[in-house]
Image: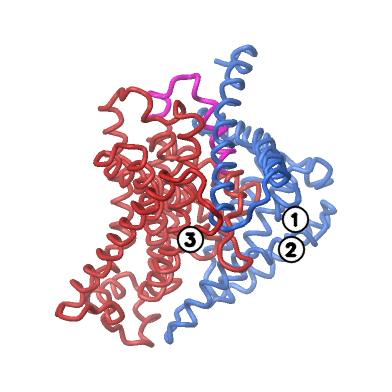
Chain colours: A blue, B red
Amino acid sequence: MIELFPQPFAPGDPQAGGLVRRWPATVKLAGALALIVGTALVPVGGRGWFGGMALLLAAIMALGRISPRPLLLRLLALSPFVAGVALAAAWHPGGTLDWRTTALRSALCLATVILLAQTTAFGEMLAVLRRVRVPALLITTLALMQRYLFVLADETVRMRRARASRTFTGGRWFAWRVAATVAGQLFVRASERAERVYDAMCARGWR
Amino acid sequence: MHVPDGFLDAKTALATGALSAAGLGFALRQVRLELPPRRVPLLGLAAAFLFAAQLINFPVLGGTSGHLMGGALVAALLGPAAAVVVVATVLLVQCFLFADGGVLALGANIFNLGLVATGGGYTVYRLVARCLPSLQGRVAALAFAGWCSTVLAATACAGELAWSGTVAWRVVWPAMAGVHAFIGLGEGMVSALVFLAIARTRPDLLPDAAPPKAAAARRREWVVLGLLTSLGLALLVAPFACPWPDGLEAVAARLGFAHQASAAPLAAPAAGYALPGVASPGLATALAGASGVLLVFGLAVAFSRLAVAKPAPSASDPA
């Protein structure tokens, strides 16, 4: 799993979060949304907002006993897009982008989402979505995706390992064909699994 | 190409959010009407598949590697409405579970990768596959569609960044479209190779193997999603795509970010694209773009011939 998920935090870790985990999911979701909208839209000069926001996030992290290390590592992984846009802006002599503010904004929003993901189970978020009348088909799809995400990722690792232990030829073109075959096989297996899942859902009285 | 939070302003986030909500709502309704209940779990599994497939690395030059985006591939495998639902699901999970892509930018990301890439990719795929219905033709169609979907999504992304006043259009569009014209080559090849692998092992899973049913519903799906996509692209890109600088300046003044761009005089953007013997810069840009698209189409056909004709080429084969 480590090679598959470079994201250094484990989503939905049931141990993380402490006190914050027990807050109602509706409150956390609504609060995170409000904070993100505010941070993304506050005018450039809003130093007070940014400072207050950073303090609030730090307080929540202290309250939930969440280690800041994964968050900092994840913030580093964000930088390609920010760096790309900053570079594009620097290219343009009359650059209109204050990229430091933009980077600060995106970092604070990212930290909020990571905190939300670390302290709230995905099922609770889905329950909130169901309460605000998101179409049932979308919720079913989201739930099934989250359920089988790690299963299929594991399957990818197994197929890759099996392939690596059987083939010896190198070459880029060959590598591409093999990787594409693995992906195609993954789709075939996902489709077959979907059939079985449907039977299991029916046996448990779905619809 | 996931836009993080903080790069888009309120009007862009609202406009793309409304477009995405409309497109996703329509796609969900369409899927509920025509997908048999037996295939409902396939949506979730296909989303998990797309997520896992995006983790498979394809080695490029040096130590770098790229991965699949998959909008065009999923559209070719499941049809456009189901593909919109699947890609939107992947983006939602990536946003809330893995903090990949912004929450406020979710509308823009679903619009770029969910509506533009799948809708545009599917349209290209259908049009080409109708003319070339053989397996090789469909592989070529998907390779071309993968490239088109990548460039279209990059264009929409550039339009959003420019419309927000984050980066000027004449900087961000050439950069985004240029980089993604190369990335799109890989996307097209990977999509086509995956499609080919499925066609070789389980051709019954491909939609074209099944008898064409509910053609009218399919057409309506296509028309509505196409209209939404074009509307969004017109909104995002058309103000900037005008080749005359005064048009751009007028738009800039109207949207109120002219003062931000006033440091640099706006010149005709076609200087780098000028073709010998063509007077109008707009026409020259269009001709250069069209010849580039034709070149990629030729590459897609050549690639499909290489991929389909030789099941196991030697390692020394140039790709």
**Type of the residue with mark 2:** Leu
Q: Please name whichever residue, A116 or B65, is drawn nearer the observer in this view of the structure.
A: B65
State whether the magenta stretch is mostly helix, strand or loop. helix
Q: Chain of mark 2?
A: A
Residue B110 lies, with reference to residue B179, above or below; the image says above
Q: Chain of mark 1?
A: A
Q: Chain of mark 3?
A: B
Quote the CA–CA distance across marks 1 and 2: 7 Å
Q: Position of residue B96 (x, y in %)?
A: 62, 47
Q: Position of residue A80 (x, y in %)?
A: 59, 68
Name which residue lies at 56% across and 45% down: B92
Q: Please name whichever residue, A158 or A123, is drawn nearer the observer in this view of the structure.
A: A158
Image quarter of residue A155:
top right
Image quarter of residue B90:
top right
Name which residue lies at 53% across and 59% down: B316
Q: Tag 1: Cα neighbours inside 10 Å, few (<14), some, or many (≥20)?
A: some
Q: Position of residue B15 (x, y in %)?
A: 39, 54
Which of labels 1 and 3 is toward the front?
3
Left or right: A179 as drawn, with respect to A71: left
Q: Please name whichever residue, A71 or A135, is drawn nearer the observer in this view of the structure.
A: A71
Residue B235 lies, with reference to residue A10, above or below; the image says below
Left or right: B257 as drawn, with respect to A129: left
The answer to the question of whether label 1 and label 2 lie on touching residues, with beta carbons closer than 8 A, is yes
Image quarter of residue B163:
bottom left
Check disc 1 and report the residue beneath it.
Answer: A8
In primary-sequence order, the first of circles 1 and 2 is 1
Q: What is the span of residues highlighted in magenta in the rendered image?
A: B30-50
Check disc 3 and report the residue beneath it.
Answer: B318
